[in-house]
Image (cartoon, helix red, strand yellow):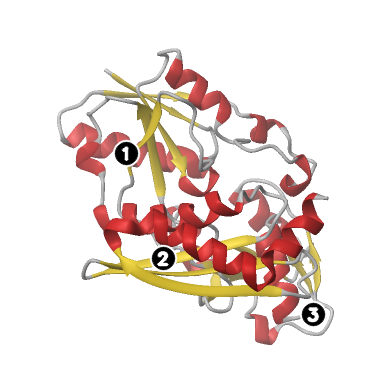
Amino acid sequence: MLVIASRGSQLALWQARWVASQLSAASHECRIEIIKTTGDKITDVPLSKVGTKGLFTKEIEEALLDGRAHLAVHSLKDLPTELPEGLVLAAVPEREDPRDAVVGRKLIDLPLGAKVGTSSLRRAAQLRQLRPDLQVESVRGNLDTRLRKLDEGQYDAILLAAAGLKRLGWGDRIAEILAPEQMCPAVGQGALAIETRAGFEGVALLDHPDSHIAVLAERGVLGALGGGCQVPIGAYATVAQGRVHILAIVAAPDGTQVIRAEADGAATEASQIGARLAAVLLDRGARKILEAVYS
């Protein structure tokens, strides 16, 4: 019996059940163990102000390390770039849509001064550059909670990951999907991370090589920048014919400055290409943004 550790949110459980179904089809018996993380317990403070890496993974990783679980299923964007000793990113299944979505009304249709909700500093910073007139306000909670707040009229629109909406059957709520050139996604957005103890080989069948390469490139950017959740950092990689292309941004939280850079190269060097792209961002002005945020 394989024990799968997961958060208890609706989306997290959808992801864990999907992994369980794939493993069951390969003749593995599975059971899901729900674990409450620090991030789940903090519901009234914007995540960017909590300032702790691994908000949604620490307690789950402890379950892996002490043997209570064989594997963990995360939203890959929640997984820190440095894993605890003894744990590995064992598989990345085929990625869902990595882009950001607007729910409510298209950006172009929002009136001056409209109120838009997002829990992400990355989305907020880029939105402020796209539409400086908008009121950007924090919105926390699971997907269904955020959609309810929109439906109650607390916001004119909200920004969410397209992947979560599509996975939970709410794709028809999407008013607009934003191109990565408009709204660079979070590192790993739309991808699942299957984390295990080193040497555990039961999940290799779930790995999608191109998706894995893309997220390695994006995580290469984030790791080299040392970015936490206080800094709006985005990266979006695509893989084709053995090559990887990455777009990445570092934004000032107030949206007054967004530093962009792109790179491509051999897919076998995905992490290194991401790290080199981070160095380009730093040289173009990202270093000053990072120093200002962390000072």
- Which residue in the protein does label 2 denote? 237
Q: Secondary structure at mark 1?
A: helix
The residue carrying pointer 2 sits among few (fewer than 14), some (14 to 19) or many (20 or more) residues within 10 Å by Cα, namely many
The residue carrying pointer 3 sits among few (fewer than 14), some (14 to 19) or many (20 or more) residues within 10 Å by Cα, namely some
- Which amino acid type is shown beneath numbered disc 2? Ala
Q: Secondary structure at mark 2?
A: strand
Q: Earlier in the sequence, mark 2 or mark 3?
A: 3
Query: Mark 1 or mark 2: which is in front?
Result: 2
**Res. 163 in view:** no
The residue carrying pointer 1 sits among few (fewer than 14), some (14 to 19) or many (20 or more) residues within 10 Å by Cα, namely many
Q: Nearer the viewer, residue 31 or 97?
A: 97
Q: Is label 1 in contact with label 2 (beta carbons under 8 Å)?
A: no
- Which amino acid type is shown beneath numbered disc 3? Pro
Place of residue 51 in the rendered image (x, y in percent of width and height, measured from the top left): 73, 41
Place of residue 79 in the rendered image (x, y in percent of width and height, measured from the top left): 51, 41
Query: Mark 2 or mark 3: which is in front?
Result: 2
- Which amino acid type is shown beneath numbered disc 1? Val
| In this view, 202 is above or below 249 | above
Q: Would you identify the image quadrant in which residue 204 lies? A: top left
Q: Earlier in the sequence, mark 3 or mark 1?
A: 1
- Which residue in the protein does label 3 denote? 132
Q: CA distance from mark 3 to mark 1?
A: 41 Å
- Which residue in the protein does label 1 denote? 19
With 133 as the anchor, is 172 left or right in this view? Answer: left
Q: Residue at x 15, y 34 (%)?
A: 26
Q: Residue at x 25, y 34 (%)?
A: 203
Place of residue 194 in the rendered image (x, y in percent of width and height, measured from the top left): 37, 37
| In this view, 212 is above or below 240 | above
Residue at the left extreme of this rendering = 27
Q: Quadrant of the N terminus?
A: top left
